[in-house]
Amino acid sequence: MIDPLFLTEAAINGLLLGGVLALLALGLNLIFGVIDIVWIAYVDLVMICMYAVYFLVQVYGYPMWLGGIASVALGALLGVAVHVLIISPILSSAPVNQLLATGGLLFFLQSFATFLWTTDHRSVRLTLPRLEILDMPISVARLIAFALAVLAMLGLYLFLTRTYVGTAIRAVSQDREAMSLMGANPQRVYVVTSAVGGAMAGLAGALLIIQYAVHPFFGAAFGPITFMICVLGGLGNMVGAFVASFVMSEVIAISGVIWSTEMGYVIAFVVFIVMIFVRPGGILARRS
Amino acid sequence: MLELRAVTAGYGAFTALWDVTLQVRAGEAVAVVGPNGAGKTTLMRVISGLIAPRSGQLTFEGASIGGTPAYDIVGHGIAHVPEGRRIFPGLTVAENLKMGAFLPRARRRFAESLARVYALFPVLAESHKQRAGSLSGGEQQMLAVGRALMSEPKLILLDEPSMGLAPVMVLRLFDLIRRVREEGYTILVVEQNVRQVLKLVDRAYLLEVGRIRTEGRAAELAEQDFVRKAYVGL
């Protein structure tokens, strides 16, 4: 029998991981929901941003908060660049070509990072106090990452529901042509959406680099789980992705302490496959 | 106000409109009637900029608007209520109306426009927090018209407003369109419900296989033999 304290600790770690996963899934899902294209290389943009924070903070000695802001700005910039340079020219071509193009970007970014920075694992060392609640060590870095991720998602929610541009983004995702009849240039809405999605990747990068070491294949570690969450929540369904993030992170964390970390991912994939059969439209899909 | 001169348009290799010439004067209500597939919807889409004309001239208040993209046409004062309503189903009624006033100029007068729309369609005020997709067909059509009014248009294009509505609702809707008209908007409406629409408008054009076959005052057109037999069902 496993000590309930271990299980509680795992559940807390799962919750904390879920926050950052949700941030990634929402960013990816926002772009898919509005532009109808899956950015295969989304988590590789996160990887680039992690390197940026690493160099700014660990190598050049800038404060972490500055590195974080720079990472968000870089993410937004990369998001716009991806849309304008890669997505925009192939917007009306076959979906498989769009997947190939963003998939190509993934390999480009991985090779680019390997070429420039080698395959060494690099991490930002912050001196953060250790926190213990009821004999359970809680990582302060994870706690901060979770809190900021939740705040960012709250901000995204308010942006999408309370502002004109945010509401227009949701409207475009429902009917692009009708929104152009309202006077909104869909291309401009796409650029704004890509910038927001990219900024979320940038923030996720800053939140991940304080917990994990970055290397050129970081995207391969977090990419698949992010896509699984998006599909599980229902592609384009923001609330579904949010819920699915925590389901998946808890599955990984809890089965991780019962068996092993590797087993945690195996179980997560099994849960995913079963769920796809049971609810192919996503966990929150409306039955029609 | 609106003038089309020898406009030809279509999709790909298919030509849906041939040499269409028509005009709408300020304050008028004009109908374009005709059977399914006559090109009525294409005509509306060319005017609102959703498709570019292949040839011919479109002018609105003296400005050439042919080939201008839809998102710039709204700013000229033309609002298009598309076929099938095309409201945003996942947004609330109030959010749909907000999107109607997307342009900065319309946004500044948002409160007045909203009050006017709610006065015309009280049911929208009652359901303003509901998801638009949960409204009935007739209410959705009112929302589509209300959303168009939010952009402060001078000309409103209505594409098949009665489509899919119960007969009682059709009568109510035409009544409401009449009231919209009395507010001073110019209207160009496309309809299959010929009998009802001819009672509503001043003039009408008959469109058949992409060409204007005849035009005239609504009352006179309704009396013409072939129109009566083919469309009015008398």
Image: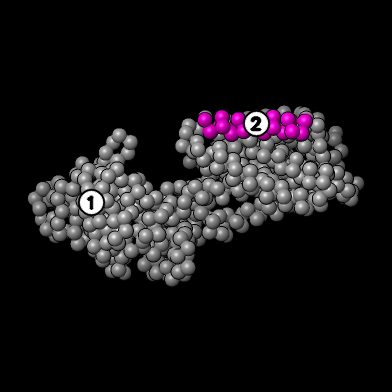
Q: Are marks 2 and 1 in contact (CB under 8 Å)?
A: no
Question: Dominant secondary structure of the magenta stretch?
Answer: helix
Residue A258 sits above or below residue A174 on the image: above
Q: Residue at x 68, y 46 (%)?
A: A74
Which residue: 26% across, 65% down?
B26
Q: Is residue B182 magenta?
A: no
Position of B119 compared to A100: left or right? left
Give A147 or B77, whichever is nearer the viewer: B77
Chain letter for mark 1: B
Please say if A105 is above or below A204: above
Q: Is residue A104 magenta?
A: yes
Task: Say how the picture is coloured.
Answer: one colour
According to the picture, the residue beneath numbered tag 2 turns out to be: A108
Q: Residue at x 57, y 60 (%)?
A: A162
Question: Looking at the picture, which amino acid does disc 1 mark?
Answer: Arg
Mark 2 burial class by Cα count in 10 Å: few <14, some 14-19, many 20+ = some
Q: Residue at x 85, y 33 (%)?
A: A1
Which type of secondary structure does the marked residue at label 2 adopt?
A: helix
Q: Position of residue A76 (x, y in %)?
A: 64, 48
Q: In the displayed image of the protein, which residue is found farthest to the left?
A: B225
Residue that label 1 marks:
B5
Classify residue A230 by image quadrant.
top right
Residue B130 lies left or right of residue A112; in this view the side is left
| Residue B84 appears anywhere in the view | no
Is B85 left or right of A19, judged from the image as shown? Answer: left
Q: Position of residue A151 (x, y in %)?
A: 70, 54
Q: Which residues are magenta?
A: A97-118
B159 or A104: which is nearer to us? Answer: A104
Residue A1 visible in this rendered orientation of the protein: yes
For the view shown, which residue lies furthest in the right direction?
A135
Q: Residue A242: where, in percent of width, then height?
A: 65, 45
